[in-house]
């Protein structure tokens, strides 16, 4: 396997599993090979067998969490990562992914705690800092969010998610003209914001607070083109149209928002208006 001979490795692991069916290691090998080959269903079968053989193996639970994530089974992934963190409390990646999944399930307090643990274990993980900043924003911990996004940018300059998050945190902490100008400069550092719905929405929100309503409308329309289910963009767009006296367009945007809530549900990636992402 280490010398990149997957077919031979698979045969040896399969032979070992036949000879020693209660040993977890051959199933771990087969599952790892299947993961490398993007055969997620086969990986899942082998990791599940491995964990039956050795339920106290933290690595297997971690790998199961990964494969459940890839197969869009969030509840199973949360359970697997929980088991992994119980058995290996210093597994920062498991803590990070657990926090991300819990946040997506709107288990915000649990997600915050898990991501806080992940960043404490590995302060140099830029992705964990960004995810922690996002949940801190949702929880209203603005100074903590600002600090997390700043750390992320130190580790990974110009990371779009960190720039957007920092702009949102700053916007809520300081909506002065100079503060909003600084926030706008953060968004302008993103290479191609027109294809990033959240960047366009954040820029539109800044323009709205600056009372530059036509620019706000244009930017929010770009956000909706990039992601037509971006519910918070419709709320802000409705406010911008109302500010320029276009009641019909404001009402239309508000109705679209309500229809999306009823038919699609809110975009999971969309925080409350004013909270950024």
Image: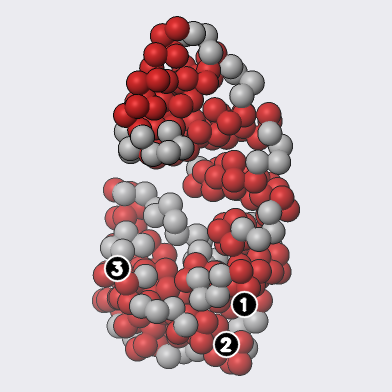
Does residue 206 lie above or below 149 as drawn? below
* Image position, residue 208 (x, y; %): 45, 83
Rendered image quadrant of residue 42: top left
The front one of 168 and 16 is 16
Q: Is residue 174 left or right of residue 199?
A: right
Residue at image location 54% in from the left, 90% down from the top: 181
Residue at image location 53% in from the left, 17% down from the top: 24
* Image position, residue 135 (x, y; %): 59, 56
10 Å neighbourhood of mark 3: few (<14), some, or many (≥20)?
some
Rendered image quadrant of residue 39: top left
Kindly identify which numbered label has been placed on residue 226: 3
Inter-mark Cα distance, 3 to 1: 24 Å
10 Å neighbourhood of mark 1: few (<14), some, or many (≥20)?
some
Mark 1 touching mark 2, by CB under 8 A?
A: yes
Inter-mark Cα distance, 1 to 2: 9 Å
Mark 3: secondary structure: helix
Does residue 87 lie above or below 256 as drawn? above
Residue at image location 66% in from the left, 65% down from the top: 148
* Residue corresponding to mark 2: 182
Q: Earlier in the sequence, mark 3 or mark 2?
A: 2
Mark 1: secondary structure: helix
Q: Could you tell me if residue 99 is visible in this image?
A: no
Q: How is the image coloured?
A: secondary structure
Inter-mark Cα distance, 3 to 2: 24 Å
Kindly identify which numbered label has been placed on residue 170: 1
Q: Earlier in the sequence, mark 1 or mark 2?
A: 1
**Figure quadrant of the N terminus:** top left
């Amino acid at each position: 396997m280490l010398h990149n001979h997957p077919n031979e490795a698979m045969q040896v692991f399969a032979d070992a599993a036949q000879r020693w069916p209660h040993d977890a290691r051959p199933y771990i090998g087969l599952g790892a090979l299947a993961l490398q080959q993007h055969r997620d269903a086969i990986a899942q079968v082998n990791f599940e067998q491995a964990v039956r053989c050795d339920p106290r193996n933290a690595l297997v639970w971690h790998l199961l969490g990964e494969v459940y994530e890839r197969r869009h089974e969030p509840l199973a992934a949360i359970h697997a990562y929980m088991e992994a963190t119980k058995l290996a409390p210093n597994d920062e990646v498991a803590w990070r992914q657990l926090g991300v999944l819990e946040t997506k399930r709107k288990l915000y307090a649990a997600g915050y705690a898990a991501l806080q643990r992940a960043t404490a274990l590995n302060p140099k993980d830029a992705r964990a800092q960004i995810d922690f900043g996002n949940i801190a924003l949702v929880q209203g911990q603005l100074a903590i969010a600002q600090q997390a996004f700043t750390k992320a940018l130190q580790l990974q300059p110009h990371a779009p998610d960190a720039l957007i998050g920092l702009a949102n945190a700053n916007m809520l902490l300081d909506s002065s003209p100079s503060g909003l100008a600084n926030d706008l400069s953060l968004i302008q550092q993103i290479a191609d914001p027109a294809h990033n719905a959240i960047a366009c929405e954040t820029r539109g929100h800044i323009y709205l607070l600056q009372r530059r309503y036509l620019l706000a409308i244009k930017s929010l329309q770009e956000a909706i083109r990039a992601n037509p289910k971006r519910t918070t963009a419709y709320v802000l767009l409705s406010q911008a149209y109302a500010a320029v006296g276009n009641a019909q367009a404001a009402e239309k945007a508000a109705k679209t928002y309500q229809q999306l809530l009823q038919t699609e549900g809110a975009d999971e990636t969309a925080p409350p208006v004013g909270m950024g992402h």
